[in-house]
Image (tube, rainbow, N blue to C red):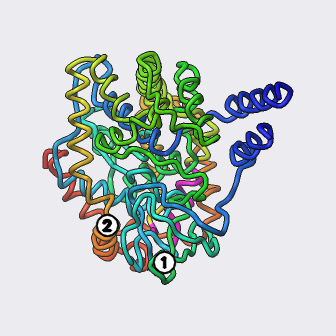
């Protein structure tokens, strides 16, 4: 029985899987649901990491999904993983501490590993990480798909890109 | 029972050894460590990012216009585009979608389509998971993967919630691993790239993405930028026949895409306006 359990547990690792129809979870923090197969056009709403949807079909790089609140939408298939393969990742220090007592953090690169690395390397590395933090904060808009969709629409239009190009 | 447990353990071990892999959130922390290390020049002096927010936003929009139409529009916390304050002519991608271009490279560019071409090449590396594959190999070499594998194996069996937490020894191994991966990026990849086959694959995919209906940049611009680079900046492509081979492969990739957009003057004008401060104009 142990052998069967181990085999089943490792099956997704041993056989590369495409996104299967059925329950899937959002695995990234910067994704959106759209009315059409696109990451920026026909924006419906931001997707939440860990949110569960039902994959109905896959069309190229996009999955057509049924949303929990009802209705259908498209999302990039690289933003999803089968629900039974989903591993919750600590997104910040608070979440990490919540998960800490459960032992999930034992073998992960996470904020604690990062803090330990900074401490080991000294003040110059602390300064470099502060630079990275400030950069990520400045570009926070780039992870909000509604904001990106709005900015890119204007950017494409002004630069004659995509649907505004003279080449069809 | 022993007869069943031993093969199961052997299978667990074999599976763990045959498929070491960082999760997307771990790639993000690796990407941050590479980004932090990229803030130093080759003499270990802190240089940081170029402090022009308007130019940074402009580079990010060009990058996002390409990345969000690519085969991998999502990374754990999204793509980030940074301008390193360095006179070296360079661009590179770290795991998790952290993409850098140097001020030295931007100064060599003549229009937005060249910038889009360089960023498309780096985004193609992320699509093809070259930074992630390198990080996985580096984690393996540093010994961190054994600590990571142990937990991954437990997670796969649904046994992670042990309540035992992380030992000091595990934390030390992981810390060393994070540093080892960052070192291998800054000392090897930022200088030499991912090897010729991977670079050619990134050129070809980059050209394809640039020509997609949702993008429509001129794919020839990247080729023109590379051809114009000073010889000492071409790295592995320094010799004439090598460079010719790369440019020819790009021509073939471009020819497959059908009619391509030309460089539009309105894009060139906004590129010049956005980079005027950098060029001292």
> Which chain does the numbered disc 1 sit on?
A
Q: Which residue is mark 1?
A: A167
The answer to which quarter of the image holds residue A130 is top left
- Side of A10 relative to B253 (left or right): right
Does the rendering let one see residue B244?
no
Rendered residue at 46%/46% (across/down):
B122
Based on the picture, tell me whether residue B101 belongs to the magenta stretch.
no
Rendered residue at 35%/66% (across/down):
A145
> Which chain does the numbered disc 2 sit on?
A
Q: Which residues are magenta?
A: B203-216
Q: Earlier in the sequence, mark 1 or mark 2?
A: 2
Give the image location of residue A38, x and y in percent: 48, 73
Q: Is residue A38 above or below residue B236?
A: below
- SS for tag 1? loop
Asked whether the residues under marks 1 and 2 belong to the same chain, the reply is yes
B203, B51: nearer the viewer: B51
> Could you classify mark 1 by the number of other residues whose Cα lies within 10 Å: few (under 14), some (14-19), or many (20 or more)?
some
Q: Is residue B29 above or below residue B123?
A: above
Q: Which residue is mark 2?
A: A148
Does the rendering let one see residue B27?
yes
Rendered residue at 35%/59% (across/down):
B62
- SS for tag 2? helix
Callout in the foreground (1, 2): 2
Give the image location of residue B6, x and y in percent: 80, 25
């Amino acid at each position: 029985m142990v052998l069967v359990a181990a085999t089943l547990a490792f099956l997704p690792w041993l056989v590369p899987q495409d996104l299967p129809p059925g329950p899937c979870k959002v695995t990234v923090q910067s994704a959106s649901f759209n009315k059409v197969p696109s990451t920026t056009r026909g924006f419906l709403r931001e997707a939440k990491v860990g949110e569960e949807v039902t994959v109905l079909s896959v069309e190229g790089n996009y999955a057509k999904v049924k949303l929990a609140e009802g209705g259908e939408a498209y999302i990039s298939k690289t933003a999803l993983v089968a629900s039974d393969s989903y591993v919750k990742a600590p997104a910040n220090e608070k979440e990490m501490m919540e998960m800490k007592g459960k032992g999930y953090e034992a073998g992960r690169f996470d904020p604690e590993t990062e803090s330990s690395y900074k401490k080991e390397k000294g003040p110059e590395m602390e300064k470099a990480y502060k630079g990275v933090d400030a950069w990520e904060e400045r570009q926070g808009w780039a992870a909000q798909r509604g904001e990106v969709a709005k900015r890119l629409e204007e950017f494409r239009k002004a630069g004659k890109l995509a649907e505004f190009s003279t080449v069809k | 029972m022993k007869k069943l447990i031993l093969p199961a353990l052997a299978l667990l071990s074999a599976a763990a050894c045959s498929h070491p892999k960082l999760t997307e959130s771990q790639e993000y922390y690796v990407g941050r460590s590479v980004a932090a290390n990229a803030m130093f020049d080759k003499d270990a002096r802190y240089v940081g990012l170029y402090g022009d927010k308007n130019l940074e936003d402009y580079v990010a929009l060009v990058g996002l216009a390409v990345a969000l139409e690519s085969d991998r529009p999502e990374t754990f916390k999204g793509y980030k585009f940074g301008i390193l304050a360095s006179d070296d002519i360079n661009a590179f991608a770290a795991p998790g979608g952290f993409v850098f271009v140097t001020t030295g490279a931007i100064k060599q560019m003549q229009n937005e389509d060249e910038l889009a071409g360089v960023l498309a090449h780096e985004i193609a590396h992320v699509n093809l998971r070259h930074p992630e594959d390198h990080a996985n190999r580096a984690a393996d070499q540093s010994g961190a993967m054994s600590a990571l594998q142990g937990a991954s194996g437990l997670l796969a069996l649904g046994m992670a919630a042990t309540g035992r937490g992380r030992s000091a020894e595990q934390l030390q191994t992981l810390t060393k691993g994070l540093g080892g991966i960052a070192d291998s990026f800054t000392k090897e990849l930022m200088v030499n790239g991912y090897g010729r086959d991977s670079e050619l694959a990134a050129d070809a995919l980059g050209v394809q993405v640039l020509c997609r209906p949702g993008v429509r940049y001129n794919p020839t611009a990247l080729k023109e930028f590379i051809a114009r680079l000073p010889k000492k900046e071409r790295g592995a492509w320094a010799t004439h026949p090598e460079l010719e081979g790369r440019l020819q492969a790009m021509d073939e990739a471009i020819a497959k895409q059908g009619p391509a957009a030309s460089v539009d003057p309105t894009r060139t004008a906004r590129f010049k306006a956005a980079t005027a401060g950098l060029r001292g104009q």
